[in-house]
Amino acid sequence: MTELSGNQKRKMKSASRLYATQALFQMEQSDAGLDRVRQEFLEHRFGAVTPEGDEMLDGDISLFSQILETAVSYQGKIDQMTDRAIVAKWKIDRIDPVLRALFRAAGAEMVALDTPPKVAIVEYVGVAEAFFPEGREPKFVNAVLDHMAREARPEAF
């Protein structure tokens, strides 16, 4: 087996964050459980070939699983942090479901994983840019995640 470069490892982690956001969205929309959705992603997304013939990125399976498990375990806490971070008078259940999934995935990394907050913010702003390339959502995500990170890990700032 070949050794992965640092750049390949970063790309795999980024792919895992995108996949985790998609999986959390799918879990909410379909009421499917964590184990079923995780297995579907591992079998059909990681390293799969798209209908156009493009190979999807392999992800870091461990990080993907950690994000999903943590997001589910800490969902109440993460949703409360998100509510406090949203400046508008909207609660998390009123925002776009993709953003809700994104905030839960990012919140999982901030609350219980060892991801530096600034890395989580940059990574999930990138995920927002992938889902909303023309919109204002990435700036909104940046602001909300900054607030969440300062609450979750104030010592990092």
Image (cartoon, rainbow, N blue to C red):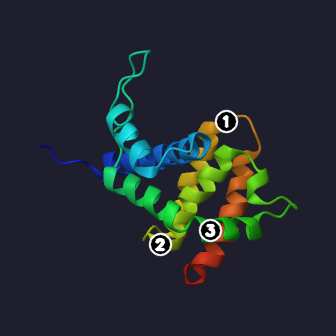
Q: Give the quarter of the figure containing the C terminus.
A: bottom right
Counting residues from the start of the chain, the first of labels 2 and 1 encountered is 2
Q: SS of the residue at dot 2?
A: helix
Q: Residue at x 79, y 60 (%)?
A: 91
Q: Verify CB contact (< 8 Å) between mark 3 and mark 1.
A: no
Mark 3 vs mark 1: which is more N-terminal? 3
Query: Which mark is first along the chain, 3 or 2?
Result: 3
Disc 3 versus disc 1: distance between alpha carbons? 29 Å
- Residue furthest to the bottom in view is 155
| Of labels 2 and 1, the one closer to you | 2
User: What is the three-letter code of the residue carrying label 3?
Assistant: Gly
Above or below residue 104? Residue 48 is above
Determine the residue positioned at 41% across, 21% down.
Answer: 50
**Amino acid at circle 1:** Pro
Q: Nearer the viewer, residue 31 or 84?
A: 31
Above or below for 47 versus 157: above
Per the model, the C-alpha gap separating discs 2 and 3 is: 13 Å
Image check: 92 left or right of 10?
Answer: right
Disc 3 target residue: 76
Which residue carries the number 2 mark?
Answer: 112
Identify the residue shown where x is 39% and y is 34%: 45
Query: Residue placed at 36% from the left, 31% from the top?
Result: 44
> Considering the image in quadrants, where does the N terminus appear?
top left
> As drawn, is 34 to the left or to the right of 153?
left
Please tell me in which quadrant of the rendered image residue 96 appears. Answer: top right
Residue 39 appears at what percent x and percent y? Answer: 35, 42
Q: In this picture, is 34 found above or below 110?
A: above
Q: Residues within 10 Å of mark 1 (few under 14, many from 20)?
A: few
Where does label 1 land, which residue?
A: 133
